[in-house]
Amino acid sequence: MASYQSIAAVGKSIERLLNAAFAEDPVPVDNKTTRAYLVRSEDFDRTSAATIIVRPALSIFLYRVDFNKTMRAAWAGVTANDGLPHLPLDLHFLLTPWGDNAEAESAILGRAMQCLDSAPILSGPLLHQSGEWQPGDAIQLLMDEISTEAVMRTFDSLEADYRVSVPYIARVIRLDGRKAAPPPDVTTVVAGARPL
């Protein structure tokens, strides 16, 4: 399916899709363009100069990577046949709106959810090219089911104030391994030895 870069490529695909939606139907936030940003944990620290989130915005945070429990056994069988490792993954994202008031944040989140519900399958040109996708590859995006308590614990671990967020899951991203090259044959040559 894809290279190890496909994990990052899924995040970039979601970012690009949401930015296209915000450009097509701008969320009215003080006549400013809303942007989606693929972020890391440090970007939630508003006191840091390293943050990339510029309001109005929607952050896309990959907070968990897990193997896909449904497809893992099936792909293990394929591995036994072709000798290549295949790792099916689920990517868990938090979408968090950033605005100057509750109305703006609700509108940003609503537009993002509308967009992802309208395009729940990423395939072909919707997939960022850095993932080295194969023809027919597709990623399903759907709302994830996690408790509010789990989201709050995530923000506690980020040392950031809780923000309303919506969890999404991207599945199934399959990382294909490369066939290992066999080690070269080793031949030991001893020069100048006499037979006993």
Image (cartoon, helix red, strand yellow):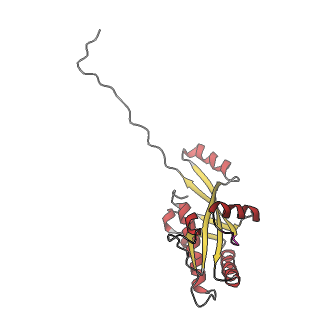
Q: Residue furthest front?
A: 47
- x and y percentages locating residue 108 in the rendered image: 66, 81
Query: Is residue 40 at least partly visible in the picture?
Result: no
Residue drawn 65% across and 76% down?
97
Q: Which residues are magenta?
A: 161-165
Q: Nearer the viewer, residue 91 or 131?
A: 91
Residue shown at the point (59%, 86%) measured from the top left: 24
Q: Residue furthest bottom?
A: 31
Q: Report whether residue 57 is seen.
A: yes
Q: Quadrant of the N terminus?
A: bottom right
Seen at 38% across and 36% down, the residue is 184
Residue 78 relative to residue 185: left or right: right
Q: Is residue 99 above or below residue 170?
A: below
For the residue pair 60 and 148, the one nearer the viewer reads as 148
Q: Is residue 76 left or right of residue 143?
A: left
Q: Is residue 120 above or below residue 106?
A: above
Q: In the figure, residue 104 lies in which quadrant?
A: bottom right
- Horizontal arrangement in the rendering, residue 180 relative to residue 144 (left or right): left
Whether residue 137 is in magenta: the answer is no
Q: Main secondary structure of the magenta part?
A: loop
In the rendered view, would you say 34 is above or below 188? below
Q: Residue furthest left?
A: 192
Q: Nearer the viewer, residue 145 or 59?
A: 59
Q: Is residue 162 magenta?
A: yes
Residue 89 coordinates in the image, percent (x, y)? 62, 56
Residue 79 at x, y percent in the picture: 59, 46
Kindly identify the residue that appears in the image at 48 percent across and 65 percent down. 130
- Image: 155 above or below 67: below
Q: Quadrant of the C terminus?
A: top left
Indicate the position of residue 158 as horizontal and vertical percent values. 62, 62
Q: How many marks?
A: 0
